[in-house]
Every structure is written in structure tokens, then in C-alpha cells.
Amino acid sequence: MTRVAAVDCGTNSIRLLVADVDPATGQLVDLDRRMTIVRLGQGVDKTGRLAPEALERTFAACRDYAAIIKELGAERLRFVATSASRDASNRDDFVRGVMDILGVEPEVITGDEEAELSFTGATRELTGRDDLARPYLVVDIGGGSTEFVVGDDAVRAGRSVNIGCVRMTERHLVRDGKVTDPPTPDQITAMRADIEAALDLAEETVPLREARTLVGLAGSVTTVSAIAQNLPAYDTEAIHHSRVSYDRVREITESLLRSTHAERAAIPSMHPGRVDVIGAGALVLLSIMERVGASEVVVSEHDILDGIAFKAAEEAGACK
């Protein structure tokens, strides 16, 4: 067995996976998988810079993760940073801080690289299933961006566009420094127009409507699944590979966009760090389903984080 560690640092959260790679099957065996909401992308869309308090929250999580990686004895670590750090003019501060704590330089990857890693992580274990038609459309709705990838066994086309749940919330649902609760019809209309324009952009290079199975990744999608199932608490096993119909996604999205902060926070499966941004994330998902005509979304807990771990394993010669 080869033990690898993968860190995915996005706009809203930073996540860790430590796993053993089975050399016989090339599959990952999880040892520790966790997520911390750090909101690294706080204000980036407006200022173009990573806020000092956002950096400190992220570095605190990195220190916690460094202790876990050391305790579990990972042989190889790969740290990938996505949308917020791509866009920030002071990303060198972020890079230096991560290197000081974890001893590796974060890879600030492109949107295309992010899309490929998301596809790998989400679809590798779907190979051979005859109940899911191909090609797949994998959508990873992050905090700052959403990745679209169409492929069968490999990526055919991918595109990253800036319509993440944090970015949409900050751009359209904030007034006088506070999130509007609930958002006004005009705010929702403006956000929807922004999302549709981004979908037009994605569709220039990715044949979205050719997909036969929609696979949804990341916290906005998994939270919608948890709500759809009326889970008493967030349950990874119940969520992974669940299927949520278009009608249910529409009902949940409309409910979230009508609700107040207190009402959203009272949902048992809601992570506190998603309360303010879940309405925007759900609307991105709903808009995608409408654009491609998807009757359901297959929800995956395995995503870019698993793709990073697979790549780390390949580099160690433990996985093909």
C-alpha cells in the first residue's frame, strides 16, 4: 500500500484526504477525509486580493491538517488551490504560508486542470456501471467557479466559469455588507441572468447537451441531496451516489431562495458555513439541469479531492 495525502483549497472550503492506494485495484481506501469552511475567497471578486483574516483562517486549517498528515504517515502530499487563489493579486502570500506550514508549494491550477481532476475523482468508480449512460457531464459547483466536463472514460471537453456559490452571493445578494434574507426577486433575476451567461460561455467549448448522465459535485450539490432526503444530519454514505430529480431540485431551490438565514440554519444537514451561500449554489445547479434537460442529478461525494489523490498515487507509481 502507498499512503497519499491530498488537499483541495477552494474559495469556500479547504479539504483533506489521506488514503491508502491498493496496488491491485488502484482504488483509494480512505483513512481520513475532512472539510473546514475557511472562506478564502472572501471579497476576492470585489477587491482582487485575499483578505488577511481569510488567509489566517486557511493557515489555521493547514496547521491542523499538517498534524493529521504527520500522524498518519503519508508518503506523498499534493496540495491544489483553485479559483480564489487563481484570481488574487497577493497569492504569493498564500503560497509562502502554505509552504511554511506543510512543506509543499500549492499548485495554483488552471480551470481546465481543475475540471480534469474533478472528472477523474467523480467518475473513476462509475466505470462498468450499466445503469448510468455515457457520456457523463460532471459539474463541480465550487465557491468561486463551476467546472463542466464531458467525457466517457476520459475527458472530451472541459471549461471553468466564474459562477460559484460564494461569488454569486457576494455579487448579487449582498447589500450594505449583509446578505439579503430572503433575496429580492430582482436580485434573483440578476443572479439567474449571470448564471445563464456563464452557461452560454461554457457551452461554447463543452457539448453540455450531449451528456446522458449528470454527475454533481461539491457542497452545494451534496447539501441539496441531504435536504431532498430529509436527513437528520449530514450523512456522507446516504448522499454518495444518491439521485435527486429535477422537480425536487426546483422545489428545494425555490424554498431556499424564499427562506431567511435562521430558517436555512435550522435545516439539520446544513453546515453553518453554507447557510449564506446555499441558495446561490442551488440556483446554479437548477440552471444547469434546465440547460441540459436533465431529469435527475447523480450526486457524488468523490470529486477533485479524489482526483488529486489519484494523481499523487500515479506519481508515486502506485496507481495507473
Image: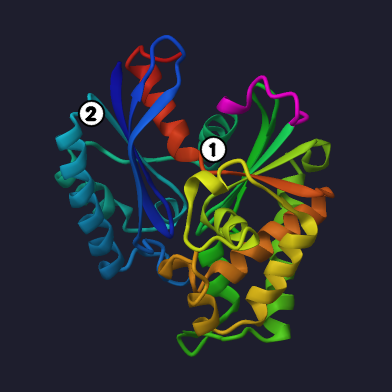
Q: Determine whether 125 is above or below 250 in the image.
A: above
From the viewer's perspective, is 159 left or right of 271?
right
Q: List the single residue furthest toward the top.
A: 24
Residue at numbered disc 2? 74
The kind of secondary structure element at disc 2 is loop
Q: Quadrant location of the N terminus?
A: top left
Q: Is residue 175 left or right of residue 283?
A: left
The quadrant in which residue 150 appears is top right
Q: Which amino acid does label 2 sit on?
A: Ala
**Above or below — where is 94 with respect to 39?**
above
The answer, for residue 217, to whether it is visible in the render is: yes
At 68% from the left and 57% from the top, the residue drawn is 285
Any part of residue 197 in sight: no
Give the side of residue 90 with respect to residue 250, left or right: left
Residue appearing at x 58%, y 79% in the figure: 173
Total number of numbered discs in the rendering: 2
Q: Where is residue 110 in the image (x, y as percent from the top left)?
A: 49, 41
Mark-to-mark CA distance, 1 and 2: 22 Å
Please state the horizontal and vertical placement of residue 100, each as a whole percent of the image.
15, 45
| Residue shown at 39% from the left, 58% from the top | 88
Q: Position of residue 264 (x, y in %)?
A: 54, 76
Q: Is residue 307 above or below residue 140?
A: above
In the image, what residue type sits under mark 1? Ser
Whether residue 134 is in magenta: the answer is: yes
Local crowd size for mark 1, using a 10 Å CA cut-off: few (<14), some (14–19), many (≥20): many
The part of the chain drawn in magenta is 124-135
Q: Mark 1 points at which residue?
A: 118
* Sequence-wise first label, 1 or 2: 2
Coloring applied to the structure: rainbow
